[in-house]
Image (cartoon, rainbow, N blue to C red):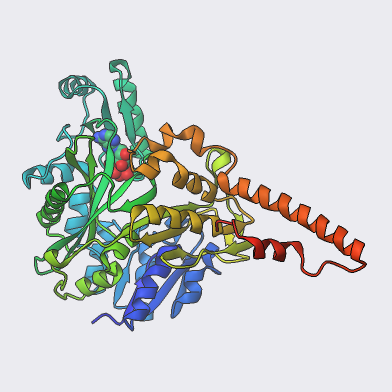
Amino acid sequence: MIKKVLVANRGEIALRVMRSCREMGIKSVAVFSEADRSSMHVRYADEAYFIGPSPSNESYLNIENIIDVAKQSGADAIHPGYGFLSENAAFSERCEKEGITFIGPSPFSISSMGDKIKARTRMIKANVPVVPGTAEPITDEKLAIEKIEEIGLPVMIKASAGGGGKGMRLVKKKEDIVSAIRSARSEAKTAFGDEAVYIEKYIESPHHIEFQILADKHGNAVHLFERECSVQRRHQKVVEETPSPLMNPEIREEMGKYAVAAAKAVNYHGAGTIEFIVDNNLNYYFLEMNTRLQVEHPITERVVGVDLVKEQIKIAEGKELTLKQDELKQFGHAIECRIYAEDPENNFMPSPGVIKHITEPLGLGVRHDGYVYEGYEIPIYYDPMISKLIVWAKTRREAIERMKRALYAYKITGIKTSIPFLARIMEAEDFITGNYNTHFIEDNRDFLMQQEPCGERCKDMAVIAAFVHYTDKVEKAKGAQNGKTAQANAWKNFGRKKSIMRW
Ligand code: ADP
């Protein structure tokens, strides 16, 4: 039985993991860098330990310091969250060696899926459909051109060690092949220290649809259905929803089976995600596996009714999965918006700074996984995502309305955030109809980038302000005529007459 978990992470995910630990009666240990001394995860944890300077390679990526804290605090397990050391096979191995339970898969599963070329080869062996392309790293440029002619343009040049959309190039014309290979290689070398790249057919107008899986150490595995992640900017997810508007029950069942087969092919245990790319004719291909908890996991938790972190902990303890595939159901609809400290009007430049004021959205069907508070200074060293807003409703339409309501109520001052941009997404026709693919943001650029963030709502506000101003004047004039002041103020009068405010 796990009694104390060190959470080797920061921000909203550290808090999210600690909350589940608390519900399970498990103590939590926070680690923090210089910049995170006053972070919320440090305040929330049962114990907190300093692990180094602000840059993450000296703190959150410092394996030695983290292992030292685990020993010092008597933590019997480490949860890596996402990012940082979560997909680092050497870290998982080190934990094993030190007798600390790693709440995640084995080093073998991580390394088998961490390298995209290796993963493709394994998936082909397991009969999981992969995007047509090369099975080997591309070293010879001449051979690459021949191979691309065979596959047919357009193609994607992708880094084998890739992640976060880095080391990826779309090639449409033959004359661009060589320069794309070279630039993808050098970007991959800088970002991952590994310059191996390979070629994939470019899937036109694709959807990114991923399946959540859970597998125990006894060979049992289930999938918890899909997440639609096609609202992307620069190949990075911005909004996710489940169920996918594209999906039908037959394809869902087929893809779910492949997701489970993919996990079994690498003896997987823990929570994981199998990402697929899907074309308009519902042909689907394995893209990659993420061997950790995903940012967007809460939408699955809400629709399926499962706490994925608790499941991860139980699996790490060696317990058998109690979830049965035929008992799992999707209920209602969930959407997640990622809130970033960045300025959509200034090319999404990061906007670090001090939070002056924050009003978090509340109410039925709203979950807010964040970590910032009034007076908190967002450090420049880490990912600028400050929170995730998740809504659930019985239908997709209602979930969109609920997300709009929550985004309109969400107020942060002191820094710029992506909230207005996300509100525009909820108002975009293609999103509302569910008729979108990974080009959605590009295709709707003009609409999404309009300076006026709140559309109809602002018109309502202008009407309200004019009306209040007018009634105020009338009341005052009446009061002056009768020789007394107005009884109720104009806002009260307005509220008593009717309410057209939509949030
Ligand atoms: P990363 O690991 O860097 O996130 P992925 O392989 O997961 O890279 O791809 C990220 C996104 O890039 C996908 O969701 C999709 O939008 C786009 N993409 C990747 N491969 C292809 C492809 N072969 N055809 C079309 N789009 C692709």
Image point (23%, 82%), residue name: 1
Q: Quadrant of ligand 1?
A: top left
Judge left or right: residue 455 versus residue 440: right
Q: Pick the residue in front: 65 or 371.
A: 371
Front residue (pair 241, 491): 491
Q: What residue is at 22 percent from the left and 32 percent from the top?
A: 200
> Image quadrant for the C terminus?
bottom right
Query: Above or below — where is 19 with respect to 281?
Result: below
- Identity of the residue drawn at 16% across and 33% down: 132
Q: Nearer the viewer, residue 200 or 469?
A: 469
Q: Is residue 497 above or below residue 71?
A: above
> Residue at left 31%, top 70%?
78
Q: Is residue 142 above or below residue 440?
A: above
Q: Position of residue 428 (x, y in %)?
A: 44, 41
The spot of residue 104 in percent (x, y) is 25, 64
Residue sitting farthest toward the front: 482
Q: Position of residue 349 (x, y in %)?
A: 54, 43
Give residue 169's quadrant in the image.
top left
Visible in this render: residue 68? no
Percent x, y for residue 249? 16, 51
Instruction: Give the left or right position of residue 6, taking residue 495 as reference.
Output: left
